[in-house]
Amino acid sequence: MVRLVLFDIDGTLIHTGGAGVKAFAKVFSTAFGAIDGFEKLKFAGRTDVSLVREFFTLHGVPATRANFEKFFEQYVFWLDHILHFENTAKTLCPGVMGFLDALVALPEPPVIGLLTGNIQLGAEIKLRYFSLWDRFVLGGFADDHEDRDQIAAKAKDRGERYLGRKLDGSEVLVIGDTPFDIRCGRAIGARTLAVATGGATLEALQLHQPTWAVPTLQEI
């Protein structure tokens, strides 16, 4: 029986119309004077910290704690601003609310959490915009580690502490829209549900051998 369900955010639960990408670009240009090379970054499935480090390297910006703090302090401001005041196409992914409601309605509902490459405050800003943040009781975030596999381990550990016992991998389900989600789920021995509501096609996701793959969460 699945006791812990961990959701990716972007492309799995929501589409922000590129608000996160726009916020990244705004901070890089205004705070670091970096306006070129942004198109080289591949955001899908990546962690915020790894993306910032890659761009720092590209522009010769020292990857110091102070520079990371400077970046993320301004990033969360711009993310919130863009979500609320810019005309971007912001939508829930198909089937999200029905699936979350169905999990809660189970006779023995699992713990519902997050496993995301977003920093925690960025995740909260995005999900509060859609009135979803309070649906999740715990999570693993880019604040925990730069590597997504390590974030998965942290999310599983928090689930175990919440439940008060160790979890077998078969008791954990990781849901995401990229091969990175499948890989990090496999890293903690979890079952994986790939959903083709992000940038990857169903066929491309199936090549990475998730436990299950569906076009949308409406198929569940």
Image (cartoon, rainbow, N blue to C red):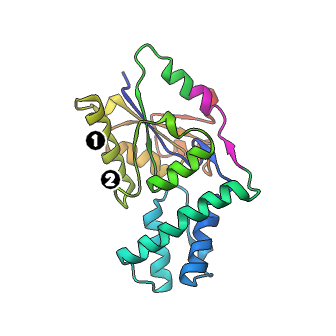
Quadrant of the image containing the C terminus = top right
Nearer to us in this view, 147 or 78: 78
Which residue in the structure is indicated by mark 2?
150
Which dot marks residue 109?
A: none
Magenta segment boundaries in residue numbering: 90-99
Residue 18, can we see it? no
Nearer to us in this view, 57 or 138: 138
Q: Report the Cα–Cα distance between label 1 and label 2.
A: 11 Å
In the rendered image, the residue lying farthest to the top is 107
The residue at 24%/29% (across/down) is 164
x, y (%) of residue 112? Answer: 44, 32
Give, as a three-letter code, the residue at label 1: Asp
Q: How many marks?
A: 2
Closer to the chain start, of discs 1 and 2, is 2
x, y (%) of residue 171? Answer: 34, 28
x, y (%) of residue 145? Answer: 34, 58
Which residue in the structure is indicated by mark 1?
157
Residue 62 located left or right of residue 35: left
Answer whether residue 83 is magenta in the image: no
The residue at 42%/70% (across/down) is 69
